[in-house]
Amino acid sequence: MSGMNDSFDAARVASILARVAKRRPRIHCLTNTVAQNVTANMLLAFGAVPSMASHPEEVAAVAAGAGAILVNLGTLSPEGERAIPKLLAIARERDIPLVLDPVFVELSPLRLRLAEEVLKQPGVIVRGNAAEMAALDAVMQSAGGVLRVTTGRIDRIEGGERVLSVAHGHEWMARVTGLGCASSALVAACRAVEPDAAIAAAAALTAYGIAGEIAAERAAGPGSFAMHLIDALAGLDEAALRARMGSAA
Ligand SMILES: Nc1ncnc2c1ncn2[C@@H]1O[C@H](COP(=O)(O)OP(=O)(O)O)[C@@H](O)[C@H]1O
Ligand SMILES: Cc1ncsc1CCOP(=O)(O)O
Ligand SMILES: [Mg+2]
């Protein structure tokens, strides 16, 4: 991690992970059909609880008690589209943090319009890859107050004047579908227990990246990597964080 003004070290990441493990926040994920399973499993490995309802008539009731809400725009159905305003309303009413994953927004005018709707809410965290974040740049600028989390070999977290970066992970994380979507859910899990959105995102991506490094040492290729990533995330402790982050984090 670089670019931090305040201290961001293994102890800080471990304390956020411990809060997730202790409070077990429920993360409501309106997410795509490709990534649902790996997202739910990654949240469980992290100590959070997934809920995945998408029916427009029940989604607000299910999301009402969640610690954070994830809106992921991949494989959106007409029903999912109708669920989004219900989720935005309940997030506003209950002050529930919102994370947007704008999957392939650069390909679809519908996704761009829905992303604009989500970004009318205050304090949204957007987590996407470089192409998605570039396509949303103008919308995020005009929305204001957005925390931008751009992932890749090096993750970049930008909010206001503050820029943080996370240089952990493994290239196989981009070779298994759904692992980006799962990273957005982990950002939501950390945000559920940590009010500083930038620190929450940095903690989630540091933990995920370090779990990826550990998993890559145990795996034979992308398939077994995905399995080992769940195990490594579930077994992550402060000693492993400290060993990989170094003292100057
Ligand atoms: N080349 C890489 N080296 C290390 N980590 C990576 C690499 N590519 C992606 N990651 C990690 O994989 C996760 C998903 O990121 P990304 O591939 O950008 O998302 P998406 O799947 O949405 O395109 C992030 O945690 C990111 O840090
Ligand atoms: C391939 C695909 N198409 C629509 S959603 C989806 C999954 C994207 O997942 P990720 O961005 O995490 O690889
Ligand atoms: Mg993605």
Image (cartoon, rainbow, N blue to C red):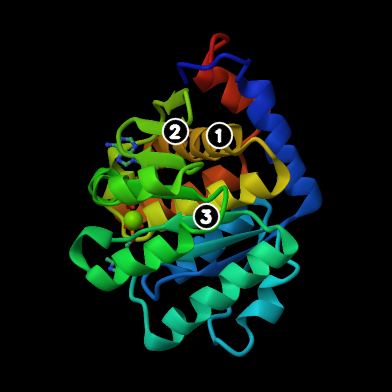
Quadrant of the image occupied by residue 43: bottom right
Horizontal relation, residue 37 to residue 216: left or right = right
| SS under mark 2 | strand
| SS under mark 1 | helix
Residue at horizontal 29 percent and vertical 47 percent from the top: 138
Furthest toward the top, the residue is 248
Regarding residue 144, the answer to whether it shows in the image is yes
- The vertical placement of 33 against 161, above or below, is below
Residue holding disc 1: 198
Res. 99 mark: 3
Image spot of residue 100 (x, y percent): 46, 57
Furthest toward the front, the residue is 142
Res. 157 mark: 2
- Disc on the earlier residue, 2 or 1: 2
Image spot of residue 228 (x, y percent): 46, 49
Quadrant of the image occupied by residue 217: top left
- Disc on the earlier residue, 3 or 2: 3
Residue type beneath disc 1: Ala
